[in-house]
């Protein structure tokens, strides 16, 4: 009951030591400081910075996408908020061309909605995804709000509400020209949203690209799936759900705290994280600033986590991981049955990583069997050799192996829609 409060007290207790470690790291490493020339200064500075980075509080990073270079030409990029909901902001990244000193928007690129996961990290984890897509698309992204920052009077947020948000975003952008990319967790609510829209006779997106998501977690279960199936729902509610302390706008709201999710992330690969921090220390001692800065950039993002609304988190555990209601055809959202076979005229591409230890092989591909109304010619699947979970949407493999196929898939179906007058 008081775990969140104890965590905040621990952070407050650590704060002076963290500030001291940051100051000491600078004193023993700054070129103009006499301390930097004392024996052992490099080791002391490296140790202090490591202590600082382990103990510091990590705020939500910025996307920081202000320009994009294509074929040697730099294009300005502007980030705009298109819609603000209590638990999510819909962002748009606009890429402009400089036409004789006048900026003009590039209007002919197909629009893409990237649905970021609400599973612990901020949507900025998809920065590389967005920046790569901007080369050839108009890009929108869901930017989920940290639940501890949402006042209690805004009400609850459930998985049904998540689905409703996605429907609203699709309608706002315009389903008839839109392509939707869902990364990890949102493959399930995105498929539900489009299924419900199709069943009602509404326009649906031109294509769906589903990447590393838990459509059917009975396929190739991972340790993440095993935890959900081996513990009853009451265990999750009793042990992982805590009220937000009074120091935040959402005080009193029941959440799954980000620090618990972060602990889970770290526990999955403790040896790798320990080795990464040790390598960071060694890089600082050797003066290898490029590798040290790469470490900082990665963990600035990885260590920045958000709280999830309790209702949404428990719904996801029960519906997706325990009862498998979507693949069993038993899921109802606000009284409407979710039936992916109702989807027609929307192309489907599923993408999985060969070495994904979060969503095992076959879990995302299961969407094809459910979407039986989509013509076989409009369905494709890609398994990325050697890629883990993050490699399919970020990093070198994403940019060189995955993105070209996503780009071409979207282009084919955008062109098919225009030639048929859809």
Image (cartoon, helix red, strand yellow):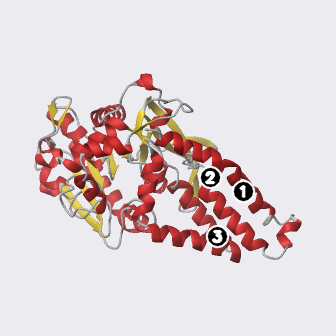
Which mark, by number, is residue 228? Answer: none
Q: Residue at x 56, y 48 (%)?
A: 61
| Residue 238 sits in quarter | top left
Instruction: Residue under label 3, please give it.
Output: 290
Q: Which one is earlier in the sequence, the residue at label 1 or at label 2?
A: 1
Instruction: Residue under label 2, please give it.
Output: 56
The kind of secondary structure element at disc 3 is: helix
The kind of secondary structure element at disc 2 is: loop
Q: Which one is earlier in the sequence, the residue at label 2 or at label 3?
A: 2
Above-or-below relation of 297 to 105: below
Above-or-below relation of 75 to 287: above
- Looking at the picture, tell me which residue is in the foreground, 183 or 209: 183
| Residue 352 sits in quarter | bottom left
Q: Nearer the viewer, mark 1 or mark 3?
A: 1
Q: CA distance from mark 1 to mark 3?
A: 19 Å
x then y, percent, for residue 382: 26, 64
Which mark, by number, is residue 22? Answer: 1
x then y, percent, for residue 170: 32, 36
- Looking at the picture, tell me which residue is in the foreground, 62 or 29: 29
Q: CA distance from mark 1 to mark 2?
A: 9 Å
Q: CA distance from mark 2 to mark 3?
A: 22 Å
Q: Residue at x 61, y 70 (%)?
A: 280
Q: Are marks 1 and 2 in contact (CB under 8 Å)?
A: yes
The kind of secondary structure element at disc 1 is: helix
């Amino acid at each position: 009951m008081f775990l969140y409060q104890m965590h905040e007290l621990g952070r407050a207790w650590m704060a002076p030591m963290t500030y001291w470690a940051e100051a000491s790291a600078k004193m023993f490493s700054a070129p103009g400081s006499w301390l930097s020339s004392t024996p052992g200064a490099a080791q002391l500075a490296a140790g202090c910075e490591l202590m600082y980075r382990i103990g510091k509080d990590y705020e939500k990073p910025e996307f920081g996408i202000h320009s994009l270079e294509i074929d040697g030409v730099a294009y300005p990029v502007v980030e705009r908020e298109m819609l603000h909901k209590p638990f999510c902001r819909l962002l748009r990244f606009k890429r402009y061309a400089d036409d004789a000193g006048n900026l003009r928007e590039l209007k002919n690129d197909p629009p893409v909605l990237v649905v970021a996961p609400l599973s612990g990290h901020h949507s900025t984890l998809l920065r590389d995804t967005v920046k790569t897509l901007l080369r050839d698309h108009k890009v929108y992204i869901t930017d989920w709000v940290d639940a501890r920052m949402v006042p209690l009077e805004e009400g609850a947020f459930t998985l049904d509400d998540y689905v409703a948000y996605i429907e609203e975003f699709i309608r706002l952008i315009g389903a008839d020209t839109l392509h939707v990319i869902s990364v990890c967790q949102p493959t399930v609510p995105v498929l539900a949203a489009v299924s419900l829209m199709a069943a009602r006779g509404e326009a649906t997106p031109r294509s769906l690209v589903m990447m590393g998501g838990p459509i059917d977690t009975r396929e190739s279960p991972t340790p993440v799936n095993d935890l959900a199936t081996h513990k009853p729902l009451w265990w999750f509610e009793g042990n992982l759900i805590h009220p937000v302390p009074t120091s935040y706008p959402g005080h009193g709201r029941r959440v799954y705290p980000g620090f618990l999710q972060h602990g889970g992330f770290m526990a999955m690969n403790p040896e790798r994280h320990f080795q990464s921090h040790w390598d960071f220390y060694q890089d600082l001692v050797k003066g290898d600033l490029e590798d040290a800065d790469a470490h900082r950039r990665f963990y600035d993002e990885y260590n920045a986590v958000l709280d999830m609304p309790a209702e949404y988190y428990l719904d996801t555990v029960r519906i997706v991981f325990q009862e498998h209601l979507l693949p069993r055809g038993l899921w109802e959202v606000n009284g409407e049955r979710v039936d992916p076979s109702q989807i027609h005229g929307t192309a489907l591409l599923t993408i999985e990583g060969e070495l994904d230890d979060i969503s095992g092989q076959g879990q995302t591909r299961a969407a094809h069997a459910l979407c039986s109304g989509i013509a076989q010619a409009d369905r494709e699947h890609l398994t990325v050799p050697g890629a883990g979970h993050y490699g399919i949407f970020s990093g070198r493999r994403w940019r060189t192996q995955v993105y070209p196929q996503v780009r071409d898939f979207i282009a084919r179906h955008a062109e098919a829609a225009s030639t048929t007058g859809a």
